[in-house]
Image: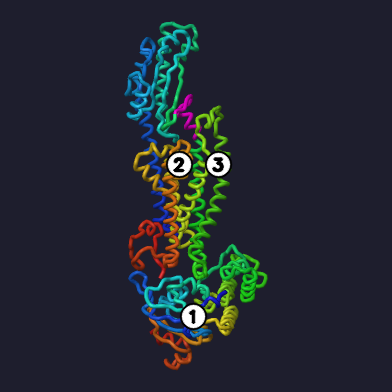
Amino acid sequence: MTNSDAKRSDGLALEVSNLVKKYGEFTALKGISFGMKEGEVFGLIGPNGAGKTTALRIISTILRITSGSVRMFGIDVGREPHEARKILSYLPEDAGAYKNLTGNEYLEFIARFFSDDTEDVRKITSKGVAIASLGDRMNDKVDTYSKGMARRLLVARALMIEPRVAILDELTSGLDVMNAQEIRRIVKDTSKRGTTVLLSSHNMLEVELMCDRIALINDGLIVEMGTPMELKERHNAGNVEEVFTRVIR
Amino acid sequence: MNSTMNILRKEIREMLTKSTILPVVLLALLFGGMGSMIGGVEEQVSRPPIVGVINNDGDGLSLLAETTISERAEVVYDGSSVEEGITAVDDAGGVALLQIPDDFTESIYNDEPGTIRIFWIMEGTGLLDSVPSSAVENVLWYVNRDISVQLIEMNSTANASFALNPTARDETTILGDREMDGISPGTIASLLSPQSLMMPIVIMMLIMAAGGTVISSMGMEKENKTLETLLTLPVKRGSIVTGKLAASAVVGLLMAAIYMVGMSYYMGSLGTSSDLDLAQFDLTLSAIDYAIVGASLFITLLAALALCMVLGTFAKNYKSAQTLTMPIVIMAMVPMFLLMFKDFGTLPLPAQLLVFAIPFSHPMMAMRGLMFDDYALVVGGLLYVSAFAIAMMAVTIWIFKTDRLLTGRIGKKVEGRRMGRFPILEFLLGHRRDS
């Protein structure tokens, strides 16, 4: 299912080269480049309107590339978006689920896009149920879920298919501390099993805790990149938040 | 009080937007247009009707009848040939050829009704198409009255009942190539009223119900933030479009079926009993005709849904989706009203072009078209609607492959500036794109 269709990579799980995105006369991305190794957790941080979501949407195949390229395990995302969709999973910042479905029905609905085999669908759904950890509430309609429960369900949706690349925008947006910690743990475990994670967040602590490397994007350009330790040393900062404020200022 | 005014101002500002005003203005214009058309018919009725007269009697009461006719109608033919008379009246845009038989006067003096033979020339079968014939009915009433007065003045009959009704009629209605004996245009219009009224209403309801569903579905996908996820799943854009269209078609058909049941009971309760039946006049549909009507309905539904899908891609949320149904409602209402009252063939040319261009018109016209063997209109319409449906589906799939679905961009320029490729949509939505 998800992993078997991918083509041979050139060593990198994700390779973004000179990516430019224009909306009419407005240039949202001005030529960003970065690469990710398989199993790596990579953070894309930046102020509001810097171009993070645009970059994530392009990598997720839902926005078209103006120029440059994105390769995912050797697949040209611009030319073969359908192939890329088989191995990626995208969790938008303010994603929602179909409110008339129960948690179980929603996960099964998504699973059916990844396999025609009933047994496979059952396995994928079971994995999602385990990740969501919502117990009996999985039989209730999504409409009745709290924000935290809905987010857990969506994270489960994104990770249950064991994507080769998971693109997570504001992973713990709107979650309380306990829920956020649990979700971070789940994502970390998933990356340890080989999933490459591209993460965007305004929560600098989360980025510092989770990411192997970080790219700081501002006004459509990557202005800084490295491991959290490298960045802190480079800017003589105590944490990533200080790095952020110093670079952006 | 100030607080109340404050809330009042805010509420009015929210309710009175361009997108709420424009549809009302368009509807007002639409009904204004309908009113002027109906006003035109009234004017037509108040003018003397155009007729032809053949007087085979040429004596006594027939001359009185002829005089009455010429005083109250515009006579464009006064000869002896039925064929020539019909052609002359038809060419002059007239309503009927009235033939007074050679025994007219003699019959009346023998206390037998003088029969006037009427050849009605009916242009269409809409509710208003039979209205001009009522002006001729009025003339015939005067003929009857004048002869009645003459009989009473001459004291020529002892039969009071006959003296009041000395004339009778024998009528044939000519509609296109078809001649129907013993039936008047009014009766034909009344027999065909289920087709005239029911079909346009049902089709309008079907399109509004199914179209509203598909537009709302797109609005809900955006409002509930499920669209982005859907677009990143390994499913072809064509499958998404097809799935949504098929679901809306099923729901729309179900809604229309429920509506039709209720409506048929309602119409049935209004109907009058009649000994006449459409089969007597060969006004029935064959199995092939029904298949063509079904095909027309199905393809039109597909075209409507594909158009709604295109509109739905511009919906930002459920509320804006509701606004976007307005063009569909208007497009369905225009042919519904026009075709309810007039036949396609009797509409003015601009109205004909408009009705033909609106794909929803074609199933509304199909049944009557097939009944009167107007296959060119029906098949031509079917081909046009098929091309329209294919084009709309292609546009929908294309939109699904572009950024427009997410960014909602309908112009080339950036936020705050207008581009005008889709100015009406932009106006309806009061659109500003997301950054």
What secondary structure is marked by label 1?
A: loop
Q: Residues within 10 Å of mark 1 (few under 14, many from 20)?
A: many
Label 3 vs label 1, nearer the camera: 1
- Span shown in magenta: B179-192
Rendering coords of residue B89 (x, y %): 35, 26
Question: Is any atom of residue B5 visible in this view?
Answer: no
Marks 3 and 1, Cα distance to the nearest angstrom? 60 Å
Q: Is residue A218 left or right of residue B291?
A: left
The span from disc 2 to disc 1 (Cα, nearest Å) is: 57 Å
Q: Which residue is mark 2?
A: B365
Q: Is residue B183 in the magenta section?
A: yes
Kind of residue indicated by mark 1: Phe
| Residue found 51% across the figure and 38% down from its top | B285
- B279 versus A136 height, above or below: above
Provide residue A139's location: percent of width, then percent of height. 65, 67
Q: Hey, what amino acid is under mark 2?
A: Met
Above or below for B28 versus A79: above
- Which class describes the residues within 10 Å of circle 3: few (<14), some (14-19), or many (20+)? some
